[in-house]
Image (cartoon, coloured by chain):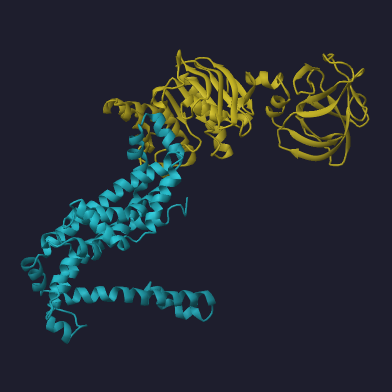
Amino acid sequence: MANVSIHDVRKSFGTVSIIKGVDIDIQDGEFVILVGPSGCGKSTLLRMIAGLEDITSGDIRIGPRVVNDVPPKDRDIAMVFQSYALYPHMTVAENMAFSLKLKGVPQAEQKKRVTEAANSLGLTPLLDRYPRQLSGGQRQRVAMGRAIVRDPQVFLFDEPLSNLDAKLRVQMRAEIKELHQRLKTTTIYVTHDQIEAMTMADKIVVMHDGVVEQIGAPLELYDRPANRFVAGFIGSPAMNFIDGRFGPGGFVLPSGAVLPLEVKPPVGLGSEITYGIRPEHLQIAPAGTPDSIPATVSVVEPTGSDTTLLVKAEGGSLTVVLRERCALKPGEAVALKPVPHHAHLFDEHGTRIATA
Amino acid sequence: MIAMAKSSPASSSSRQPVSFAFLAQVILIANSFVMLYPVVVMVLSAFKTTGEIFEHPFALPDFTQVHNFAKVLGETSMPTYFVNSIIVTGISILLILVLGTMAGYAVARYESRTNTFILLFFLAGLMLPLKLAVIPLFILLRDLNLLDSRWSLIVTYTAIGLPSAVFIMAGFLRSLPAELEDAARIDGASEPRIMWSVMLPLARPPMAIAAIQNAVPIWNDFFFPLVFIQTDSYKTLPQGLTTFMGEYTTDWGMLFAGLTIAAAPITLLYIALSRQFIQGMTAGAVK
């Protein structure tokens, strides 16, 4: 096991800059998730850590060693790929033993380690099968088994669950987390799915356009997003944003309605600011209630455990999540009342300036 | 196929597509007959004497009459021709596969500015019938002291076969997922090891195609041995068999026995590799 430190790492393909100076420190045994929309550079960064892509500038350390010029096989890492990348012409056992065989580990030891890994992943009855004879979830497990047998210092996962159906994904999510709790190996995991990030990570790195937007624990990102991008990316359904001005009575919507603020933001009166509020922090009140946002219900989506409302307000549509069931009908006029202390204010650059 | 053809007429009157299928079956059966007829005649005639061949060309022979074969194998240089053909075809195919796969692998899997040029250079070879260049080739082989040796044929056939082999291999190897290579690299495999243990086992179908596609014309080639080889002990089968055709008389029974023996190995090879061959032809059709 080892810590991983990434210092001012950059990557360009020709003149196109993909990673624009990234600093991340990963502690020994931590489960870190790199998350961001596609094209943000997260997979490239992971491949750079693995040694599959060159680093244009900066340093990557695994343990005390700078690995910039170390080939992948000498970095003591294991990687699980999105397509699993199992060798189609080898059985499950051969797939798992391949790296040990190349390392010259004695046969008996190979067999022991493969058996152990297979046992822990429930693969024992499948050891003699070929990848084409396995289901998606089983292939995923074999790919993990192949990583485990090597007992590496760092596990790298590149969107390992995106080829699985929704139900299996939830199950594998728990299995990977359990595996990490058992092995306590430093893990770096790439995904575009913020739910995966929230549920599995010790620490989340949100990336956007080749830069790190914020690093923090899942709930920290949820409760105190550093900027509008993180606020919008983390959380599902996404946070509602309303553009307006800071006025004497609080946040002034374009229509002139005013939402009172508990905290005074550090900007001058009349400054343009954005008011962000999560769907579950909006309450439904009778139309005409003061200090609220007037809106019209457009879609009601009951999921059983809660109800999602899409409402039309001035400046666009907003999402409201209600824990209790509701009898609202599309077309009904309502008022949305924000829960105090849960609104996030962003300045015109998108940086968070206050929670009100 | 025949069963289908028999059952088709009943339903053909009711539905249009079936009659097309029926027609297709008729054409296919007729075609297989045209294709198989010479082969069958060749095999049947191999068991007949020259007299019988002309008296009863279509009659079934007495299959215990193997004196034609005995004569061909015992009294002529046929075994030598056979061994020469095996050596020449075998080494040529081996060289074509080894060199073609390596070149195809490099072109397909490594990024380099010269890749396209190299591939186009090989492809240019596909468009050049080497028979047109037989005189310069003759001079070249003479200067290399290779004339009248098996090597003259081997190097020529390898050169002719390489372009298509590179083309087939590069096309297939390009379609293999890059993640497999990455996985092997992380698992600790060296570049030659990745090629040998991971990529090549997956490339068996295109290798079978490249092998068959080249082996048949090489085995059957008459032109280059005729030009390059004088010594009887270096002759290959197609050239050697012509010695059975006399100026005034020809022992047709013996000639057909020789032809049957000559055609056997390549037919067997084709049957053995046909599964891989068909797999390779349809590779990528279904994921």
Vertical comparison of B242 with A309: above or below:
below
Q: Can residue B1 be seen in this view?
A: yes
The tint chain B carries is cyan
Q: How many labels does the image show?
A: 0
Position of B271 compared to B19: left or right? left
Residue placed furthest toward the bottom: B55
**Residue A192, quarter of the rendered image:** top right
Q: Where is residue A315 in the image (x, y as percent from the top left)?
A: 85, 34
Compare residues B105 and A294 and report the one nearer the observer: B105
Residue at 46% x, 30% y is: A52
- The quadrant where residue B8 appears: bottom left
Percent across and percent down for residue B156 are 26, 55
Whether residue A292 is situated above or below residue B211 in the rendered picture: above
Residue A190 location (% of width, % of height): 55, 29
Chain in yellow, by letter, is A
Residue at screen point 31% across, 27% down:
A110
User: Front-most of A56 and A339?
Assistant: A56
Q: Indicate the quadrant where residue B160 lies.
A: bottom left
| Residue at 61% across, 34% down | A38
